[in-house]
Amino acid sequence: MAQAVVRERRVLQPQTRLPTEDELPDEDDSFVENQESDYAAILLTETLDIEWQSIPDRATGRNMVYHHTPPKPGRRIGQNELLGPDMWAAVGVPKRLRRSWVRWVEGKAPDVVVEFLSGKTAHRDRTTKKRLYEQTGVQDYFWYHPHTSEFKGFHLVQQQYVELTPDASGALYCQALDLYLLRWQGEYKEQSREWLRWRRPDGTLLPTAAEATAQAMRKSAEALAEVDRLRQHAAQAREITDRALQAAAEASEEVDRLRRHAQEAEEARAAAERRIAAMAARLRALGLSDE
């Protein structure tokens, strides 16, 4: 929807080298954005940024000038030549702050562009921008109209866009990111309405910052509950162990007691046998039979 953005119009001086990001316009004086489209673009970049936070060669941006073709030396860059994708994403590029996307500096176009249509920009988004994105190598191009729910996507095949067919849920596959883009009814930034969301191939949505925080808090609570459960099990196990050790000690004492009794009985038996033998000897000495 946005036409990208510039406070100063620079005239490039004749030169043999291509201009850098710092030498090119990074805004356009026709920039007009509404909060509806701004929130929609933020939702898409926010969720990708969270998903890619540990991956260094992934980048996203929104409402940023896209310099697709090197300007001719000494020629003023026309407003119609400046493209400002509402949202873009790229893989295989450094994660850094950019003033604009310069195709000959980055070595490629953004891999994915999403435009949010409005009455003022819809025609250009469907025609001029689509043609330029196609010609300059944007792999996947999507547009969505927040008021009519018009939602289309295109994938670049042999330098030509082929319209994507939605799956059973109405989602469109973004091959460049291995993600699906779909219309989703829900609440974001306290606004309940239809939004575009990214979905993984396994069917789960890429979380927003609020959702990721809620998930982390829920997992933390579950982990704490699991720790408490394990502590209770450990305490019960210690109790059982203590009882077993006590029973073993008592059993050992009983074994010692029985051993002593057995020893005493054996000693008593030996003493009785000795007394019997002594008595038999005395009887024999008296000439009496011991039988």
Image (tube, rainbow, N blue to C red):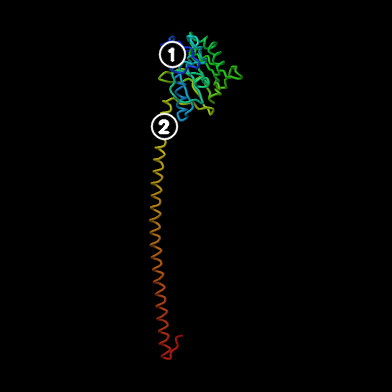
Residue 243 in view of the camera:
yes
Q: Percent position (x, y) of residue 277?
A: 42, 83
Residue type at mark 1: give it: Glu
Residue drawn at the location 39% of the way across and 65% of the way down: 256
Give whichever of 121, 152 is nearer the camera: 121
Which secondary structure, mark 1? loop
Q: Amino acid at mark 2?
A: Arg
Q: Residues within 10 Å of mark 1 (few under 14, many from 20)?
A: many
Q: Nearer the viewer, mark 2 or mark 1?
A: 1
Q: Which residue is mark 2?
A: 218
For the residues labelled 2 and 1, the Cα–Cα distance comes to 42 Å
In percent of width and height, residue 48 lies at 47, 25
For disc 1, the marked residue is: 27
Up-down: is 221 above or below 100? below
Residue 115 at what x, y percent from top left? Answer: 50, 15
Residue shown at the point (39%, 53%) measured from the top left:
243
Task: Name the element at disc 2.
Answer: helix
Dot 2 or dot 1, earlier in sequence: 1
